[in-house]
Image (cartoon, rainbow, N blue to C red):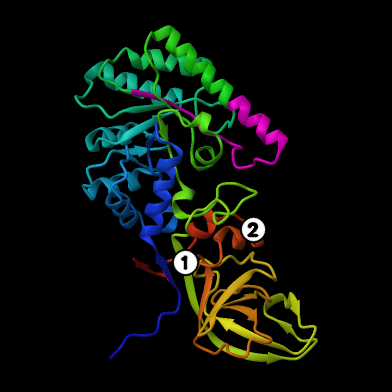
């Protein structure tokens, strides 16, 4: 007997992912690429995404993750690709795990530097993983101040076995329309270059650098340096506040689907859903879709948020009416006489950019992707 009909599912287009990766290569022909696959590859499935990237035959320098658990899970797959732990080790035990697994580490604090010094002075291991020295160029989250960074660089240079990369992270590169953001980004780049130049002058050697994530890759070629770290753009969404992934020529990797489970006629003056946030101004045909915030659909989605209905004649665009609940949302179907119970629905993906849905929900595409729950089935193609 056949199993139950699919309720909510996400299709992952690995060819779209590979084409987005090829776009990174075209934009940064001289830089090495480190795909960011933290947070289960932004909700897309870390193992499957990592394997698809390898299958693309685009050369990559490492995979970047955000937790020790992610690093060890990736290491267990034996993909023969270096792993970069973006926050670095949190304690001495994690340093040991990183060294044993060959995980490259970001070093961003005097606390970490002290642990490294003690470890290396007592017994520096052979084949120690590469270290990424993080400069706080203005974001004030992680990283050494300029003076601390220079000292840390020279401290670690005492150990010839250690390979170093100078890195930082852009805080406002996603907002190309704001003069304040543009000025902030320019100051960050200038600070990074100043510290790099000082290290080159004092050490008498080239300094390997990394600064650009997706926004820098797309809009700031002067930040590409030796390594780039693409994240959300790989998944077809935009890091920029004023342009969607579609407008940037990126291809959606995830398409989120559900189905219509009921169609009702609601009288003018009647409300729909919790809180009566939508009142019908006319006789309204209302569709009920089997997805809600327990699946990861944003409860913050407002009246008017776009939804697509698949019909035999093509995709029909409609809109959310009423508040999203735990297991259901409601949409307007007035005038859509061909739409029937059981029809497939697209919440975002091919035909409906996740960036558009995110804006209507007061969030960003990153959060939409990462908040999908275990109730969503994933299919890879």
**Dot 1: element:** strand
Give the crowd class for mark 2: few <14, some 14-19, many >=20 residues within 10 Å. some
- Using residue 142 as the reference point, say whether residue 131 is left or right of it: left
Residue at 57% in and 21% down: 191
Residue at 34% in and 48% down: 70
Residue 1: % across, % down? 28, 91
- Using residue 195 as the reference point, say whether residue 305 is left or right of it: right
Name the quarter where the C terminus is drawn.
bottom left
> In the picture, residue 130 is in which quadrant?
top left
**Dot 2: element:** helix
Measure the alpha-carbon separation of dots 2 and 1. 17 Å
Of 61 and 67, which appears nearest the observer?
A: 61
> Which circle marks residue 359 in the picture?
2
The magenta stretch spans residue 172 = yes
Residue 94: % across, % down? 32, 36
Residue 274: % across, % down? 68, 77
Of 109 and 270, which appears nearest the observer?
A: 270
Q: What range is drawn magenta here?
A: 164-188
Residue 43: % across, % down? 43, 57
Q: How many marks?
A: 2
Q: Is residue 26 above or below residue 311?
A: above
> Which circle marks residue 255 in the picture?
1
């Amino acid at each position: 007997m056949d199993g139950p009909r699919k309720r909510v599912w996400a299709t992952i287009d690995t060819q779209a992912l590979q084409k987005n990766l090829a776009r990174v290569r075209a934009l940064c022909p001289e830089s090495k690429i480190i795909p960011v696959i933290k947070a289960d590859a932004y909700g897309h499935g870390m193992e499957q995404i990592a394997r698809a990237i390898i299958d693309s035959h685009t050369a990559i320098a490492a995979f970047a993750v955000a937790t020790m658990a992610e690093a060890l899970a990736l290491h267990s797959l034996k993909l023969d690709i270096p792993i970069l732990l973006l926050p670095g080790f949190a304690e001495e035990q994690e340093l040991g795990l990183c060294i044993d697994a060959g995980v490259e580490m970001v070093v961003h604090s005097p606390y970490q530097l002290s642990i490294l010094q003690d470890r290396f002075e007592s017994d520096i291991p052979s084949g120690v993983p590469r270290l990424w020295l993080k400069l706080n160029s203005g974001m004030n989250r992680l990283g050494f101040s300029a003076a601390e960074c220079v000292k840390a660089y020279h401290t670690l240079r005492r150990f010839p076995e250690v390979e170093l990369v100078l890195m930082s992270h852009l805080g406002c590169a996603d907002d190309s329309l704001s003069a304040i953001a543009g000025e902030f980004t320019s100051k960050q780049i200038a600070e990074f270059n100043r510290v790099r130049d000082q290290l080159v002058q004092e050490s008498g050697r080239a300094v390997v650098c990394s600064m650009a994530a997706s926004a820098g890759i797309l809009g700031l070629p002067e930040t590409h340096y030796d390594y780039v770290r693409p994240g959300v753009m790989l998944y077809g969404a935009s890091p920029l506040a004023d342009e969607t992934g579609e407008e940037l020529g990126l291809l959606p990797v995830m398409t989120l689907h559900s189905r219509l489970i009921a169609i009702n006629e609601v009288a003018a003056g009647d409300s729909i859903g919790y809180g009566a946030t939508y009142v019908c101004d006319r006789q309204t045909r209302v569709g009920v879709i089997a997805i809600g915030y327990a699946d990861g659909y944003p409860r913050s989605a407002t009246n008017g948020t776009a939804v697509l209905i698949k019909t035999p004649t093509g995709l029909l665009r409609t809109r959310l009416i009423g508040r999203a609940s735990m297991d259901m949302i409601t949409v307007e179907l007035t005038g859509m006489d061909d739409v029937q119970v059981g029809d497939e629905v697209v919440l975002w993906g091919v035909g409906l950019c996740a960036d558009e849905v995110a804006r209507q929900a007061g969030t960003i595409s990153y959060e939409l992707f990462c908040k999908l729950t275990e109730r969503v089935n994933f299919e890879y193609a």
